[in-house]
Image: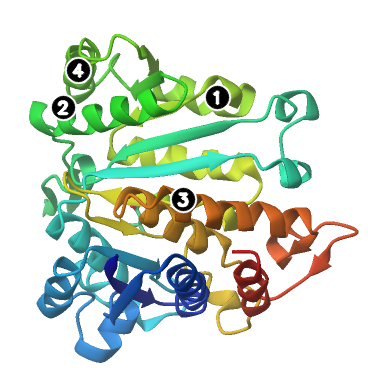
Amino acid sequence: MDLKITCIPGDGIGPEIVGEARKILDVVARKYGHVIRYTDILMGGASIDAYGVPLTEEAVAAAKSADAVLMGSIGGDASTSPWYKLSPDLRPEAGLLAIRKALNLFANLRPAVLYDELVGACPLKEEISAAGFDMMIMRELTGGLYFGKRQTTESDGVKTAVDTLVYNENEIRRIAVKGFEIARKRRGKVTSVDKANVLDSSRLWRQVVEEVARDYPEVTLEHMLVDNCAMQLVKDPAQFDVILTENMFGDILSDEASMVTGSIGMLASASLNDTKFGLYEPSHGSAPDIAGKDIANPIATVLSAAMMLRYSFDLDVEADAVEKAVKQVLKDGYRTSDIMSEGCTLVGCRQMGDLLAERI
Ligand code: IPM
Ligand code: MG
């Protein structure tokens, strides 16, 4: 197969982890007879430094012309980096929001899995972590508070700021359909998370999700209020299969879910539109404090590349091979510093990439 992949190395540890993910993709391509053509584009701080804006139209066009996009991470240290002296629409994060919108990436899949080998890193009590967990957070990514109208005004010396949470039923329906489709291939349960006891947008969310559920009789639907969900994630994470939720709730809950795995350096994500096209990136940030030191964990990006093989290219065997290599490397006792534990062998970013490549 001919695979056209656009890479966004980005900022901080981004270039290092994308480099390792490419290493793995290249090994997969060689072994399974595929040809990969890469194009690199700039986004975030790297693009600000080069062009004065966090995302150019040329970069969007290059991303659009590919079959999929592999991204590292963007952004810097907000208290020291000059990027954060710019107006909000010119900061690194604005590039990420703009590309999500431009590519219509409304469905963000964030798996949170407790790996057997890393169970010791889970911050929950043993009686909770013993049950294990494997959930998929399905976050709506192009609507809600992130893209509603916002404004700060001042009147009589008093400043007022407004952000708007807007959803129309079509936006809710398309993400709900994705959620049920994924649940059908997993354990058949959707937990739709909202704040329907307060918000109109949540009441519409609930109604539309219930309509969609009728087309999926084999999937169980439950509703949960977002504050309760935040509690349940630490009390009994094993109860969740697919968590379906709007943009802002999903941002917060996915960070919480990744924290309870104890290994955010391991968590992948995929942002999809309604074709096979997707943008794949680790769930973690750009970690500017450890950038360039060859100590970052490349596994989340490698697993994101595996999601790309699975969701954009339907290459399940290849994706399985990458995921198996990750499990094997952990079984063999190799760890980057973020997941290091006693008795294991500490390795750097590049070496972790090499060890994974050997196991494909
Ligand atoms: C994420 C990040 C982004 C978001 C930021 C960097 C704008 O936190 O991908 O979860 O809030 O969506
Ligand atoms: Mg976030």
Q: In which quarter of the image is residue 180?
A: top left
Q: Nearer the viewer, mark 3 or mark 1?
A: 3
Residue type, numbered disc 3: Val
Name, please, the residue furthest toward the bottom: 50
For label 2, being within 8 Å of ligand 1 is answered no
- Marks 4 and 2, how far apart at CA: 7 Å
The residue lying at 29 percent from left, 81 percent from top is 40
Residue type, numbered disc 4: Val
The residue lying at 43 percent from left, 61 percent from top is 305
Q: How is the image coloured?
A: rainbow
Q: Regarding ligand 1, which quadrant of the image does it lie in?
A: bottom left
Q: Do the residues labelled 4 and 3 touch (CB within 8 Å)?
A: no
**Residue placed most toward the observer, 143 or 87:** 143
Q: What element carries label 2?
A: helix
x, y (%) of residue 78?
A: 43, 71
Q: Is mark 1 on a helix, strand or loop?
A: helix
The residue lying at 21 percent from left, 22 percent from top is 205
- Marks 1 and 2, how far apart at CA: 27 Å
Mark 2 is surrounded, within 10 Å at the Cα level, by few (under 14), some (14 to 19) or many (20 or more) other residues, namely some
Q: Name the residue under label 1.
A: 231
Disc on res. 212:
4
The answer to whether residue 246 is left or right of residue 332 is: left
Q: Is mark 4 on a helix, strand or loop?
A: helix
Q: Name the residue under label 2.
A: 173
Up/down of 130 relative to 297, above or below: above
